[in-house]
Amino acid sequence: MASHQTDSKTTQESRGLEYELPWLVPALLAGTCIFYFYVSSHSYPSFGAGLYFHIAEHISENGYALPKTIPGYTAEGVPFAYPPLMFYVTAALLDLTGLDPFTIAQYLPGLVSIAYLIPLYFFARDLFGSRPQASLATLIVAVSPPILQWHISAGGIVRAPALLFSLIGIYAGLHLFRDDDARWMIPALIAFTLTILTHPMYTIFFVLSYLLLYLQFDRSVEGLLRGFFVGVGGILLTTPWWGSVLAAHGTMVFSAAAGTHGGIGNAIPMLERFVEQQISESPLVSMWHIAAIVGCFWLILKREYLLPTWLFVTVATIEEARFVFLIAALVSARFVFSGLVPWLHRTSFIMFGREEIVTFSVVVLVTVSLSGGALYATGGLNAHAGSPSLPQFVNEGDVKAMAWAESNTDTSAEFVVLGDAAEWFPQQTDRTMLVGPWGVEWKGHQQYREQLRQFRRLSRCHSSNCLTVRLMQFGVHPDYVYIPKGVYTIRGMQRHQPDRMIPTMMRSPQYQLAFENEEVAIFRLTDGWHPPRSGTTEPIPV
């Protein structure tokens, strides 16, 4: 692979962008189609970004100074230790455009998800020395559900830019280490700095990628120094942010968050889930997963170790499918064009020429990939243990119920919100939500797991008795409880609230109906009644 890259380098750099467009356009068109299907099928953005917008609003209200704590998410609020770049960008968008958070959350991630395909294409082109392979790899990423899930959805306002910055930096790193080109040090430094300021997990991915590129292509003292320049320089340039976080919250805040999202040592569980996923997923989606597995073995036999090593190290250190499948797309493209197509040419398709085989294969692959991505984007595929893909956390009924809560309750009112609409609740109402895991990772693994446990158990209640006993068990004392009706989600998993829930609440002396529409009911806890703390662990009838 390396010799092929070297031989084609001069030819590649002598061509203009107009020569690249035919190879880049398929992925950009696919990404645009997926974005269109997603927006057309969703009245509100999928998943949640309420906390992110709440942070942005507090930054704006604070005169664009870093806040210390974000209120509304649990009684004490959550520490503000997130990398701040995209929150400042979001605050500026809110202030300058007048757009509402739902609109920004629905459109901005998708636009950036199209943009990050460009540096990915150029990285794959220069890594493989092949435009067709780069084109296919970029196309796979554009339509891959594990990548779309985290970048086109609402939380992509942070994650999609983080992937964009990290891919720009990895492209710079390829030239920095393989081509010994010191001109890429400054672009690499800027990209790493922006990645640090956007998302910690993508920063880890950036660093791991640089280490592997250095070991594969350089291994010199000069290369090591260039890598240190990028790494240390990025850390120094971001000192104003992480220095203020350390001053406000101490060193434990970062280690606390790291302990809540997997990490090193998760290779075997991740691989088990990867294999299990192939059994239940649509063939339109799992085709590329299988190609990546076979491709890794083929690359090892061909003694091309970079991509298999990169894939394994990512699985072993970052328990997130979005990074695994990004590299898997590179593996698949390399295998299809350098392994599978030549094999087909030598065997069963001998009556056709290589050009016909490649054309036919690409047409089939593009059609199948785009179909699978479109189904996923519209919610037409089963995901999340059988739940529809890319679910909306809120609907029109939720928005109206939250507007009522903002206008008709005291600013000090505290709520327990059942279901994932809770993620948007503090941002939409400026009221406190007592139970929910969002942002609590900065308080540590134990508090995060406890909040997650309480949120799940309360959200699964289907009777007033269940709700009352759970509130007693957890020692939670809300002024109001917010109950979804019909279909709702818990951590992305679709649930159905049975019709009996609201009548049991109406009959209970502890609750008084305060608001109701077709999708939501809000109950006030009656005067003088607060659930006392209880250590009961008995099964609760629902």
Image (cartoon, helix red, strand yellow):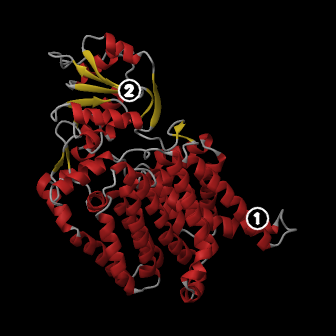
Residue type at numbered disc 2: Asn
Query: Residue 237 appears in which quarter of the rendering?
Result: bottom left
Above or below, 278 against 132 in this view is above
Residue type at numbered disc 1: Phe
Residue placed most toward the observer, 42 or 366: 42
Residue placed most toward the observer, 363 or 353: 363
Residue placed most toward the observer, 101 or 172: 101
Residue at figure coordinates x 19%, y 43% from the top left: 71
Mark 1 residue crowding within 10 angstroms, few (<14) / some (14–19) / many (20+)? few
Report the side of 90 relative to 122 (left or right): left
Residue at figure coordinates x 60%, y 81% from the top left: 19
Q: Which residue is mark 2?
A: 517
- In x, y percent, where is residue 179? 46, 84
- In x, y percent, where is residue 458? 33, 26
Residue at figure coordinates x 17%, y 54% from the top left: 61
Label 1: which secondary element: helix
Report the side of 346 relative to 42 (left or right): right
Report the side of 454 relative to 394 (left or right): left
Mark 2 residue crowding within 10 angstroms, few (<14) / some (14–19) / many (20+)? few
Q: Where is the C terminus found, in terms of image quarters?
A: top left
Residue placed most toward the observer, 469 or 413: 413
Label 2: which secondary element: loop
Closer to viewer: mark 2 or mark 1: 2
Q: Which residue is mark 1?
A: 360
